[in-house]
Image (cartoon, rainbow, N blue to C red):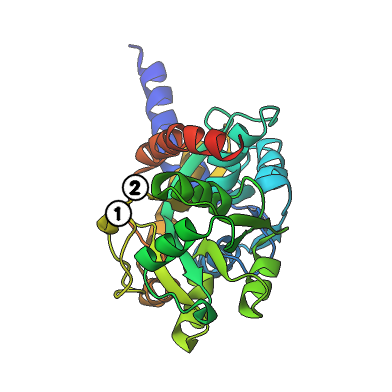
Amino acid sequence: MKRRTLLAVTAASIAALATPTLAETSWPERPVRILVSFPPGGSSDLVARLLSEKLSDALGQQFVVENKPGAAGTVAATALQTAEPDGHTFMLSNLTPFNVAPIRFPDTPYDPIADFDHITYIGTVNLALFVSPELNIDTLEAMIDAAQAEPEKYEYGSSGVGSWGHVMAEHFQNVTDTELFHVPYKGSGPMRLDFRSGVVPAIFDAVPQNLPSVQEGTAVALAVSATERLSSLPDVPTFSELGYDVVAENWLGVSAPAGVPDEIKAKLDTALVEAMASEDVVAQFDSWGLVRAPKESAEFSDYVASQLEQWTPLVQSALK
């Protein structure tokens, strides 16, 4: 190699080493949106707002939560799919738009795996069967006995037809040979309001938002859909330990439109992992009943795909 060429190559190599990567300099260049597929106040919204504060501090730009509810989460997921993959739009992803809606709506305009990069797994929110104390039912077996004795007498609320609460309630009825009367709502907020006021005596719903009612004695948790008992409800059995195959995980994560540069995904993942390890976030997650289990990005993508496979027969059965 000629000396002039060698010097040029050496200079170029030094310049490349001295030049910061994209992840070190240019991202984020402006405020970053975190889309949420539910209205304010739900599990996804609470988690997104907590983590957005941490990301804003860590990465030097505002991370802004943008609620885009509607159509079983497909409004937000479609907005994510069509966003520029430049690292300035992400989503607090969850079960409904990626594992339930594509089965419920065959014309969903996106592929829940191929059209997204699922970056960081956050954790899982579990579901429980809650009943009003006025029913005088304090065990799952008592609820099953009552429902079998008087089919369709007992009403239950869900956040809508095809919601994970509805899907799991239908599955519960299949495995327990019971018939409950379904009262669908347009969202979990109005459902919980009616439950707390005594309009509907039972709900299949997420644990975190109902913990205050359990603690106040205005709701009774009969069983949870986790694989093991929750630290937030240590005295409440799982459906599985009572002999019923009712397991439901509403996973939460951070996803991006497909094509975001690897450097940005790696930087965001690192910042999220650090945020979730902080004492205040751990304490808050525990108080919400959010179950954490670290997953690498590739493992998270595989998990989303496996959840789609798991939920397909459940959703199809519920919507018959």
Q: Nearer the viewer, residue 22 or 229?
A: 229
**Which residue is located at x 53 percent, y 77 percent?**
132
Badge 1 vs badge 2, beta-carbon distance below 8 Å: yes
Q: Which residue is mark 2?
A: 245
Measure the C-alpha gap from mark 1 to mark 2. Answer: 5 Å
Quadrant in which the N terminus is drawn = top left
Tell me which amino acid carries mark 2. Asp
Q: Secondary structure at mark 2?
A: loop
Quadrant in which the C terminus is drawn = top right
Q: Please indicate whether residue 156 sits to the left or right of residue 1 in the image.
A: right
Q: Nearer the viewer, residue 151 or 185?
A: 151
Q: How far from the left and from the top, in percent, is residue 286?
A: 38, 73
Q: Which residue is mark 1?
A: 240
**Which residue is located at x 67 percent, y 47 percent?**
72
**Which residue is located at x 30 percent, y 66 percent?**
237
**Which residue is located at x 68 percent, y 55 percent?**
30
Q: Residue 20: tell me if it is visible.
A: no
Q: How far from the left and from the top, in percent, is residue 259?
A: 57, 32
Q: How far from the left and from the top, in percent, is residue 265?
A: 48, 44
Q: Nearer the viewer, residue 291 or 82?
A: 291
Q: Nearer the viewer, residue 50 or 101?
A: 101
Q: Sort mark 2 into few (<14), some (14-19) or many (20+) by Cα contacts within 10 Å.
A: some
